[in-house]
Amino acid sequence: SKFLNDKWMIKNGFLNDIQEHKPWWWNIKVQKLNLSAPLILLPEVSCQKAIEILQEKGYDQAPVVAESGLILGMVTLSNTLTSVLAGNAQFSDPVTKVIYDQFSKIGLEDSLGKLSCILENDHFAIVVHEQMQFNGNGSSFMKQMVFGVVTAMDLLTFVSRNDKK
């Protein structure tokens, strides 16, 4: 049934959007949101330290990224606190014990329309940028770099500030 759902098809890149009455912002690229650089946590950060960092810096969530650049998931302040208080995690446990590993990624060149479809079901999307990297022997590979985290509030703020009406 997913394949009969246009929004699922758009979100997963199988279908270009066919909505006829698109809002003015629908085809604008994600890069126009001017997102600030995200706070990134390494997997060995403890739950205690993650809570302290998120509170101190004023963030609700942060991507957890391995030193290799692999995106492992997202940690949220509320989920970390809930897990520790419920006894499912200890303050000393690594933050990987409380991460969400189900998350959506979106590129800087993707449209705000695609982002809107993602945010209908997800609280956030990780904005990634593909970058070519070369090894010492000259071989190359593509690496995804975390460029930001975008929420429905970011989209709403952009639309309301730039409303063409």
Image (spheres, grey):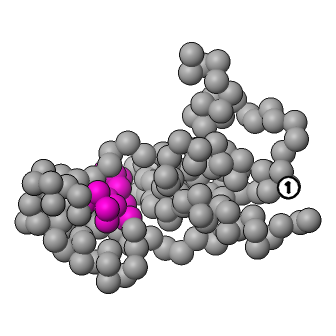
Q: Quadrant of residue 62?
A: bottom left
The foreground one among 135 and 50 is: 50
Q: Is residue 138 above or below residue 39?
A: above
> Does residue 92 appear left or right of residue 51 in this picture?
left
Considering only vertical position in the picture, is 12 above or below 59? above
Amino acid beneath label 1: Trp
**Is residue 44 toward the left or the right of residue 72 in the image?**
left
Magenta stretch contains residue 34: no
The residue located at (54%, 75%) in the rendering is 36
**Observer able to see residue 132:** no
- The question of residue 72 being in magenta is answered with yes
| Residue 58: percent from left, percent from top | 40, 79
How many numbered circles does the render carry? 1
Residue wearing tag 1: 24
Q: Residue furthest bottom?
A: 56
Say which of 2 and 68 sits in front.
2
Compare residues 60 and 46 and report the one nearer the observer: 60
Q: Residue at 44% of width from left, 70% of height from top?
A: 38
Question: Residue 7: which quarter of the image?
Answer: top right
Q: What segment carries the magenta color?
A: 61-80
Name the residue at 87% across, 36% down. 20
Vertical order, 7 against 156 (above or below): above
Q: Quadrant of the C terminus?
A: bottom right
Figure quadrant of residue 136: bottom left
Residue 41's x, y, as percent? 29, 67
* Residue 130 coordinates in the image, percent (x, y): 52, 54
* 71 lies left or right of 152: left
Is residue 109 in sight in this rendering? yes
Q: Residues within 10 Å of mark 1 (few under 14, many from 20)?
A: few
**In which quadrant of the rendered image does the N terminus lie?**
top right
